Amino acid sequence: DEGESLEEAVAREMKEELGIEIVVKRLLCSEQSLHRKDGKFIMFVTFEAALIDPENVSFVPSEESEEIRWIDRNEYDAANMFDQCPKPFKTLWGIN
């Protein structure tokens, strides 16, 4: 939304899209990539964040959500997922 910081935007989007409240801790990385379908550049911005109330969380996906699931490093590596934006995941998992 106009006038909000990236940190405010990611917290708002998490609330709107997943129904969870987070506090953003720090920026981990950003990466620009060419989107294969329409040829436009897109920016991936990855933050470290924490749930505000981790003991009382239930994900409530919005109608815009196509799929939500947890993945671990092995699944990511085996499926070659997110090949357009590898840097955020490599940063998160410390992959060299």
Image (cartoon, grey):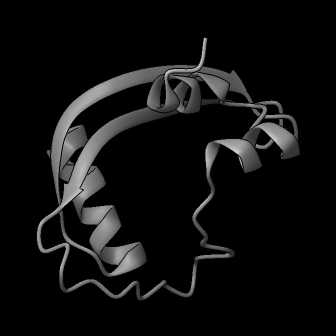
Residue 56 picture quarter: bottom left
Is residue 56 depicted above or below 14 in this figure? Answer: below
Q: In this view, does 72 lie to the left or right of 21?
A: right
In this rendering, the count of numbered labels is: 0
x and y percent of residue 5 in the render?
A: 17, 40
Residue 16 visible in the snapshot: yes
Q: In this view, does 71 lie to the left or right of 1?
A: right
- Which quadrant is home to the N terminus? bottom left
x and y percent of residue 59 in the render?
A: 40, 84
Query: What residue do we see at 66% from left, 27% from top?
Result: 86
Query: What residue do we see at 68% from left, 23% from top?
Result: 33
x and y percent of residue 70 in the render?
A: 57, 64
Question: As drawn, which residue projects farthest toward the top?
Answer: 96
Residue 1 visible in the snapshot: no
Question: As drawn, which residue projects farthest toward the front?
Answer: 74
Is residue 24 depicted above or below 11 in this figure? Answer: above
Is residue 89 depicted above or below 10 in this figure? Answer: above
Query: What residue do we see at 59% from left, 76% from top?
Result: 65
Residue 73 picture quarter: top right
Depth check, front residue: 4 or 29: 29
x and y percent of residue 22 in the render?
A: 19, 61
Depth check, front residue: 10 or 56: 56
Query: What residue do we see at 21% from left, 54% from top?
Result: 50
Is residue 14 depicted above or below 43 in this figure? Answer: below
- Which quadrant is home to the C terminus? top right
